[in-house]
Amino acid sequence: MPAVVQFLLTMVQKIFLDTDIGSDIDDAVCLAYLLANPECELLGITTVTGEGQYRAELASALCQNAGQDIPIYVGSEFPLVVDQQQPQAPQKSALMSWKHRDDFPLGGAIAFMQETIRKNPGEVVLLTIGPLTNASLLFRVDPTIPSLLKGLVMMCGVFEKDGREWNAMLDPHAASIVYQTDIPHHRSIGLDVTQQVTMPAEVVRKRFQGSLLQPVLDFAEVWFKEQDDITFHDPLAAATIFQSGICQFKCGRVDVEIFDPDELGKTGWENDIGGPHEIACKVKPEAFFDHFFNTVSR
């Protein structure tokens, strides 16, 4: 059976989310989508990059608004080798308007990821929508974990045009480790595809009206002080787990530049029908937005 339909073999998907929520607004949009999706069993959330405590609080606000008690751990705040380029979580300024927890375990994120995956062998899709620091540490701490995953889905990279993508750039050495790891189903949704699902701020304000999206819209107003639209990078990656037909995919090999200081995090792509990496190569924007809003409006 083709790898592209593998995630659709079960009605409910067990998801573990690793996120840098609080910077780009699409992380919050993605979490709201997962919380609304009846086919998603969200097992846990870990944060990555600077001000992890605030990022955990933002995730908690969305979970509490959805009436769900999801375990949240503060993960690594610093890249493996390079300097931190994302030290703050700007959307923390909207937290005062929303009930949320502030008592999160510190220093246990990797152990929590490991424990959760081991308790559900072959069933968990690890969804990474931030830099890959936590994922790389997990794979190095316990090299058996990748074989216990159902799959890894990442918003990462840019493959069919020139350029670099933020998640790979923020921790290129972590990204390199993850792409070199043997994983049963390794899928990347890259910037060259996600940039095709963008919505202007005025349309977002009209369409983000359901109760699950109210805190997201509040966080988005912080984002809109600097940007005039939302690109649904992370929600698109998540949606492919449940509706793979939204994108077309092809297999090959990805490598990450970690030596040239001017190209750190650049993702190279080689077509190979038997390659270990699956990338999205096309997207159906209307199908994605229909699926997204049908899900979050339930």
Image (cartoon, helix red, strand yellow):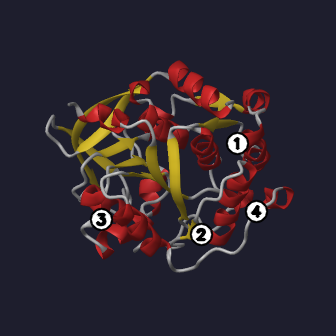
Residue 102 visible in the current orientation: yes
Please identify, in this view, whether the residue under mark 4 or under mark 2 is nearer the observer: 4
Q: Amino acid at mark 3?
A: Ile
Please identify, in this view, whether the residue under mark 4 or under mark 1 is nearer the observer: 4
Label 4 or label 3, whichever comes before in sequence order: 4
**Residue picked out by circle 4:** 100
Horizontal relation, residue 46 to residue 80: left or right: right
What's the CA distance linking mark 1 and mark 2? 21 Å
**Residue picked out by circle 2:** 50
**Residue at the extreme bottom:** 107
At 68% from the left and 60% from the top, the residue drawn is 60
Q: Is residue 167 above or below residue 213?
A: below
Label 3 or label 1, whichever comes before in sequence order: 3
Q: Position of residue 133 (x, y in %)?
A: 43, 66
Q: Residues within 10 Å of mark 3 (few under 14, many from 20)?
A: some
**Circle 3 — which element?**
helix
Q: Position of residue 163 (x, y in %)?
A: 41, 44
**Residue picked out by circle 3:** 145
Q: Position of residue 70 (x, y in %)?
A: 60, 59
What's the CA distance linking mark 3 and mark 1? 38 Å
At 58% from the left and 25% from the top, the residue drawn is 289
**Residue picked out by circle 1:** 227
Q: Amino acid at mark 2?
A: Gly
What's the CA distance linking mark 4 and mark 3? 31 Å
